[in-house]
Image (cartoon, coloured by chain):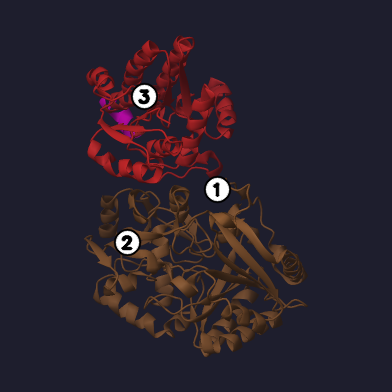
Amino acid sequence: MKMLSGWGRFPKVECRVVRARTQEDVRQAVLEAPLIARGNGRAYGDAALNPGLTLDMTGMDRMRSFENGVLVAEAGVLLGDIIQAFLPRGWFPMVTPGTKLVSLGGAIAADVHGKNHHIDGSFRTCVDWIDLMGPDGTVTRTKQGDALFDWTLGGMGLTGVILRAQIRLRRVETSWIVQESVALTSLTDTIAAFEGAMDAPYSVAWINCSAGKTHGHSILLKGRHALPQDLPMDRTEFDLGRPGKTPVPFGLPFLFKGAALRTINSIYWRLQRRKAGRAVVDWDSYFYPLDGLANWNKLYGRHGFVQFQCALPKDTAEAGLAEIMEAIAASGQGSVLSVLKRLGSQSGPFSFPMEGYTLAMDFPTNKRSLALMERLDTITMAHKGRFYLAKDARMPKAVAQADPRAADFAAMRKQAGMAERFTSVQSRRLGL
Amino acid sequence: MSRPILILGAASDMARAVARSFAAEGHPIQLAARNVSRLAEDASDLRTRFGVEVTVHEFDALATDSHKAFVEALPTLPAVAVCAVGTMGTQSESEADPLAAAQVMRANFEGPASILAHLANAMEARGAGTLVGISSVAGDRGRASNYVYGSAKAGFTAFLSGLRNRLANKGVHVVTVLPGFVNTAMLDGIDTPAPLTAEPEEVGAAIVKAVKRNTNVIYTRPIWRLVMAVIRNIPEPVFKKTSI
C-alpha cells in the first residue's frame, strides 16, 4: 500500500500499486481487480487514484517507431521524453499542456489542450490511433471516427487501459518561440485582445483574480515558433538547454492568501508590464515555466491545493468570468496562478474544451476555498459552462451530472462492461 | 560516437535505464539477456529515441560454459561492459532450501564474475576498456534479512576490487556500483525510505559519469556511503542483536 495523490496533493489516498512493464502485466492486472491506470501523476485531483488497484504505467515507456513526424509510443512515455528525442531533429508536439511531465496516456485520457487550442484543437488532433485494453483483457486499436475513440479522448482512463498510440508531431525550424506580451488592465480589454489575436498560433493570459488595485489586470502572451531568421546571431537553431530543476524544499502556504497574495499579484503584473513587447524565448520557459521548479506543488504546504478550471461558452464568457472574479475578490481568497485562455471550437464529443474561454486557478486546500469553489460551480453552471476533470478533486456529483454527457458516458460504460473493471476515486465520486 | 556498450542482464529496469543513459550519449548498444525476444521492444525504443545502432544477444549468466563463446561471438568487443545481472531471491526460501540459496549465489556472484573475467581478458589483450559491475550495499555487511544475496554480492564486490587492482596498469578500468535502494521491479511491494531510494535513471546517469571519470566505487546516492559506514562499524556483539 502506498499513499498517493494527484499533483495538487489533495486528496491523499492509500492505494495498492502495481507497476506494469509489458502488455501482459496490464492484462493480468485488468483481469485481477477493478483498477485505474496512472501515468506520471499530473492530474491534479483524484482521477488516477484507486485504493483497490492503481496500475502504474510509467514502466511502459518505450518508443516503437518514428518516421517523418509520426511516432508510435507506449502510454508511459512523457511529452518531455518526446521533446528530448525529436526536437533536435526538428519536431515538436502538436498540442502540449502546461507541463511536459504528463504521460502520453494521461494526455490522451484527459484530452489535454494547450495555448494553441483556438487553432489546432485539443490533443486528439494529433492522435491517429490508440491501442486500448478492454475489460476482458483484449486489445482494440481504436481510430479517429470510432465511438470508442471519442469516449477515450477525455474519458479519464475509464474506457480501458491505454497501452500505446500513434501521434503526429509538428515540424519546427528552431527550438525557439517569438513571444509578444501585452499588459492589459481589465477583463474586457483582455477578451478583446484575445479576440484580436485569433491568428496567433499560441495565446494565453495570466490574469489577476485577487482583490486590490490591480484586480482584473492581465498579461497576454502571444507566441509562434521562431524561424531561423528570427534568431539573434549568437543562438543555435536547436538548443535543448539543460533540464535544470530547482527543488522546492518546503511549503510557503502563507504566500497564497491575504495581503501577501495581493502584493505578489500586483508586483508580478508591474514587472511583466515593464518587460512587455517582443522577445525570443526558449521552448522550455515558454511552454513549461513551472517545470523548472521541481515539486512546486509543495509550496502550498501539507494540505496541498485544489485547482478550479471551468470553460464558458463564448457568448456568456465575459459576464461569467466577471462574476467569477467578483466572487473571488469578495471572498478575500485568491489565486497566484490564474490562467485565462481562448478556446477554439469543440473537437471531441467528450472533451472539456468548448468554443469560448477557460479560466484555471489554484487555491490552497481549506474550508474557505472549498466553499468558494462551490460558489464558482454555481456561477459556471448558470452560464452553461463545464469543468475539467483532469483538474477536479472536489466537485459534487450533482455538478458533474449537470453536464448531460456524464450520464451518457456512465450508461455506455455500464453497457460495455467497463464500469466494473475501470474505476477511480473520481469516477465514483462523480458517478461516471 | 562509435564506442559500443554491452549491457548484460539487459531486461531489468536498472539495465534499461543504464542503456538509455549511454545511448543518449550516442553510443551503439549491445543488449544481452536470456530470451532475447524480450529485448525487441527495448531495442526499438533505443533506436527510436536516440537513433543509435542496437543489437541483441542471447546470454545466460548461469551457463558459465557458454561465456567464452558469447564474448567471441560479439560483433565487436565493447568499449564498456556493464553487468546488471542479479536476482534477490527470497531470503526465507534461501534459508529453507540451500539449493535455492546456491542459485542466488550463482546468479549474483559466479555468473557475473565469470562473464566479466572473460571480458577482462579480452580487454586486457586489447589494452583498453571499462568493466562496470553492479553489486550491492547488501554485500557490505551480512544481515539476517538478506545475507544469502548479500554474501554473493560481497563476493562480487571483492572480485571487482581485485580485478581493478590487477588491471590498473593494463588500460582497463573497473567500476563497482553499489546502488542502494532503487525503484525497480526488485523492490516492487517493498516500502523503502524515499531519501535512500534512487530512480533507475539516477543509476544510469551515475554510471555514465563514473565511466567518463574512471571512478572506482560509486554509491548512487552519496548518503549511502555514510549509512553503510555506520552499519559496517557497529560492533558485532551489538550488531547481532539488531534487526536492520
A271 left or right of A368? right
Q: Nearer the viewer, residue A161 or B98?
A: A161
Query: Does any portion of residue A51 appear in the rendered image?
Result: no
Q: What stretch is highlighted in magenta?
A: B92-99
Residue on which the image places disc 2 = A161
Q: Do labels 2 and 3 share a chain?
A: no
Q: Which mark is residue A239?
A: 1
Query: Mark 2, chain letter?
Result: A
Q: In which quarter of the image is the C terminus of chain A?
A: bottom left
Q: How many angstroms separate mark 2 from mark 1 (CA)?
A: 35 Å
Q: Nearer the viewer, mark 2 or mark 3?
A: 3
Q: Identity of the amino acid at label 3?
A: Pro
- Chain painted brown: A
Q: Nearer the viewer, residue B183 or A105?
A: A105
Q: Residue B78 carries which label?
A: 3
Q: Is mark 3 on a helix, strand or loop?
A: loop
Q: How many angstroms separate mark 2 from mark 3 (CA)?
A: 39 Å
Image spot of residue B187 (x, y percent): 41, 41
Q: Residue B16 carries which label?
A: none
A330 left or right of A69? right
Q: Does the magenta stretch include residue A127?
A: no
Q: Identity of the amino acid at label 1?
A: Asp
Q: Identity of the amino acid at label 2?
A: Val
Q: How many angstroms separate mark 3 from mark 1 (CA)?
A: 31 Å
